[in-house]
Amino acid sequence: MDMNGEERINAPIEAVWRALNDPQVLRACIPGCESLDKTSDTQMTARVVLRIGPIKAGFDGMVELSELNPPNSYVISGEGKGGIAGFAKGQANVSLTEEEPEVTLLTYVVSAEVGGKIAQLGSRLIDSTARKLAAQFFSNFGEHLTKTIQEPHLASA
Amino acid sequence: MNDMTPTREQREARLEGMGCKRKRVEDVRFTQGKGQYVDDVKLPGMLHGDFVRSPHPHARIVSINTEKALQVPGVLAVLTAETLKTVNLAWMPTLAGDVQMVLADGKVLFQNQEVAFVVATDRYAADDGINAVEVEYEPLPALVDPFTSMNDDAPVLREDLAGKTEGAHGPRRHHNHIFEWTVGDRDLTDAAFRKADVTIKEMISYHRTHPSPLETCQCVCSFDKIRGELTIYGTFQAPHVIRTVVALIAKIPEHKIHVIAPDIGGGFGNKVGAYPGYICAAVASIVTGKPVKWVEDRIENLTATSFARDYHMTTEIAATNDGKVTGLRVHVLADHGAFDACADPSKWPAGFFNIVTGSYDFPVAHLSVDGVYTNKAPGGVAYRCSFRVTEAAYCIERGMDILAQKLGMDPAELRLKNFVKAEQFPYNSALGWEYDSGDYHTAMRQMMEKVDYAGLRREQAEKREAFKRGETREVMGIGISFFTEIVGAGPSKNCDILGIAMFDSCEIRLHPTGAGIARVGSKSQGQGHETTWAQIIATEIGIPSDDIMIEEGNTDTAPYGLGTYGSRSTPVAGAAIAMAARKIRAKAQMIAAYKLEVHEDDLEWDIDGFRVKGLPEKYLGMKDICWIAYNSPPPGMEPGLEAVSYYDPPNMTYPFGAYLCVMDIDVDTGVYKVKRFYALDDCGTRINPMIIDGQVHGGLTEAFAIAMGQEIHYDENGNVTTGSLMDFFMPTAVETPVWETDFTVTPSPHHPIGAKGVGESPNVGGVPAFSNAVNDAFSFLGTTHIQMPHDYWRNWKVAKELGVVG
């Protein structure tokens, strides 16, 4: 399935870009993310707990950043295995545009694929859940940044 | 005779023999929750097994790590293909001549395939163990669409068959090809098409679905190391075949294997085959020395054990301008999934699909079937039908409607014009069957009269005009189905399973007081054998059916039989019962002759005993004969009164029926209403009309489910998207229409009591009636063929494409 959307963030493009590359920010914003640890400049390992319909499962996986074009765009992709619950993988093409010096427009195009039990049981819920999760991530992200601009002591939270 | 002497009618009634609406004796325990099912079997020290299953439809297995699982409290063992290889059981033979992985060996080929078997002290611990097994997969491209399976670039599914150009049923043309099966005269058929005034050609799909019995597949295996004996309690439709298969593949002597099928909560073909769960539970019991239970959950049942159908039938009919059929040509693309595990008699890779000429007198026909592998679960069982007969009936019954539409002829009239006539029986079909008996015209005309067919067509014409004028948003469809089944597999000359001829058997033992027990090689899964088998015996030997106990399912006590599926119980086991009873009656006649001091030929049978011809007061009843047989038999005669019969049927039986469905469909919502459903069945001699009605109700309900929404659906990535009852349509009393039943009686000339079998007819005949009704409803708007299943959403899509959604 494919999803797209946009988020207007009250922060300069450089700050948004930094946050997009900061594992701590990502961990705070990815819905259900329990851990996110950097293993190299562009790779991280993650654990995310998701609930789709009747299934709740923890996914262990890799997150990778590629096609880096600072501070304008990158591709963030992830792949997670949820044991008997199945697996999920997806990627998001994220682009930043400076609308004003303090306002950045973030646009994203996400494609995702699920398999295993979550695909069997949640087929009618997957599209809406994925859409919700993607929107939630980017809105969390926007909110987080806006907050850190207003309250800089939260920056490394 | 004094006034106290019962009349003939009273004596007859007391027997509750054939033709009586005897209440089901098994229901006494079923309705009080006292049935004994496999899950009720609880043995001391019993362990529980459960599967790690593949989330991927096609992947290479890089590694399986069981270390963490073995540390989970309660987990005692984890079996993998490597473990099974040590006992040469990583793969098992299928009924169709293929082999199947018991546990994934190197790769997985369908989603939810069995990868490892965790054995623990309880089911919860087993489940925790499953979560702790670490399997690393390397996903491979999934092959989902059977139409692309034989493309040059199609992924190789079965690496174990690399280089094998010959399969169990002849040459393989492609790495994903299983077999090609052809029947009929190709040249004559092609010639008929060249000369035809009118031809039709349509790809008619019968989608993948699942028998989904209430009770899933399950077993308890218990290996006794001291005695070297294996006891298996299981949900088996064919317990003796399971015992023989276990003996052959596990190399345990057959007499040291005890297979017991207790009460079964529905089979519908799902419980014919052998599944990895049975093998793993048996191996786990041998490894741990304790009994091991394996019980499938609903998702496992729907996604891993035995789908049904998935036939894609390119159907062509040639005819004259006035509607006489002159030729039939069918090509089937059969999606068998990852392993060919079809449960057909071994020589019949497409079952009895060559019954596809149906009830019509086709002078020539040709059929070819290509079986292919895809990344889907194996199976291909006869879901409440004889082998692939429901696919054949759907194919020809849709085909005839499509032809009628092209000719501008009424579909009932087209059928009447082409039926095999009563005087043509026994009738040899163009595809090789000898139909035993039938009277199609009478049945069809009775149906048309009872439903006021002409009146229905007038009502439809009026409704269509009203629709065109915008006065109604509903379209009305009338679906006719006239099916001929082929059941009762089968004669040893053409039917066997892994070399075992498809006879059946009965052993009757009468006790001195005039009661008795009959053990039969069939196995009821709800059909009511305990009731009907006793009725046959009651009529044959004059012992009340209440005094006969029926026992099935224990291979130590029941005579060897091939079990219950394909409507074979009455045609085959029912015949064995009658023949065993007749052996008893023959001995009883000798006893009666001795006691009444006449020659045997001077006796006549009279309901419940023997009477001397011309001397009605000289009578000896069967109850007395039983006592005499044990305690004072004629000199030189062995005591006792028992008999065994093994029955090898001379031919199949050919039940038939005329069904009609009236349906309204709302074009704005796709919602349908079944206004009327009439089902006339001719199953030959009727043993218990109440049980026949029950069988017909059940079969029609399943036909309704299949035609109107029930489906095993895979998405393009190979995920099963209908793996639970949330998505898999299982009608309840709320959705189920009211059924009207009717009958004619055309006995089978070769069956001892003339019975033909009925359990599956309603599923075979019902599906085309529903589908024809939907197609008939839309046809005046320009459709030729709409694929099943016809759920609300798909009906709405059809209306949307026709541009009639408001």
Image (cartoon, coloured by chain):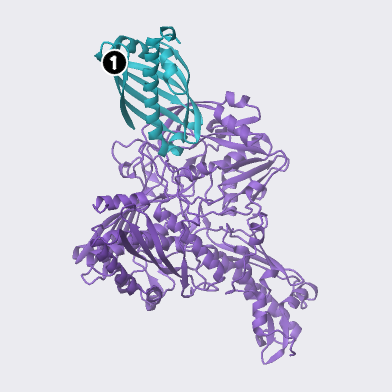
Chain colours: A cyan, B purple
Which of the pair B708/B301 is nearer the observer? B708
In the rendering, at what x and y percent does residue B187 appear?
Answer: 25, 61
Is residue B494 shown to the viewer in this render?
no
Q: In which quarter of the image is residue A128?
A: top left
Is residue B598 shown to the viewer in this render?
yes
Q: Quadrant of residue A112?
A: top left
- Residue ID for mark 1: A104
From this viewpoint, which residue is outermost toward the top? A153
In the rendering, at what x and y percent does residue B270 appear?
Answer: 51, 51
From this viewpoint, which residue is outermost toward the front? A150
How dense is the environment of label 1, judged by Cα within 10 Å: few (below 14), some, or many (20 and up)? many
| Above or below, comparing residue B594 to residue B284 in the picture | below
From this viewpoint, which residue is outermost toward the bottom? B614
Is B308 situated left or right of B475 in this image? right
Which of the pair B488/A83 is nearer the observer? A83
Is B178 situated left or right of B242 in this image? left
Which of the pair B163/B657 is nearer the observer? B657
Q: Residue at x 59, y 30 (%)?
A: B128
Quadrant including the N terminus of chain B: bottom right
| Above or below, comparing residue B305 to residue A6 in the picture | below
In the rendering, at what x and y percent does residue B540 appear?
Answer: 63, 75
Q: In which quarter of the image is residue B538?
A: bottom right
- Secondary structure at badge 1 equals strand
Q: Which amino acid lies under the numbered mark 1 shown in the image of this protein?
A: Thr
Is B593 situated left or right of B474 in this image? right
In the rendering, at what x and y percent does residue B782 appear?
Answer: 23, 58
Is B567 situated left or right of B524 in this image? left
| Above or below, comparing residue B669 to residue B1 in the picture | above
Q: Residue at x 62, y 31 (%)?
A: B77
The answer for which chain carries disc 1 is: A
| Above or below, comparing residue B318 to residue B161 in the picture | below
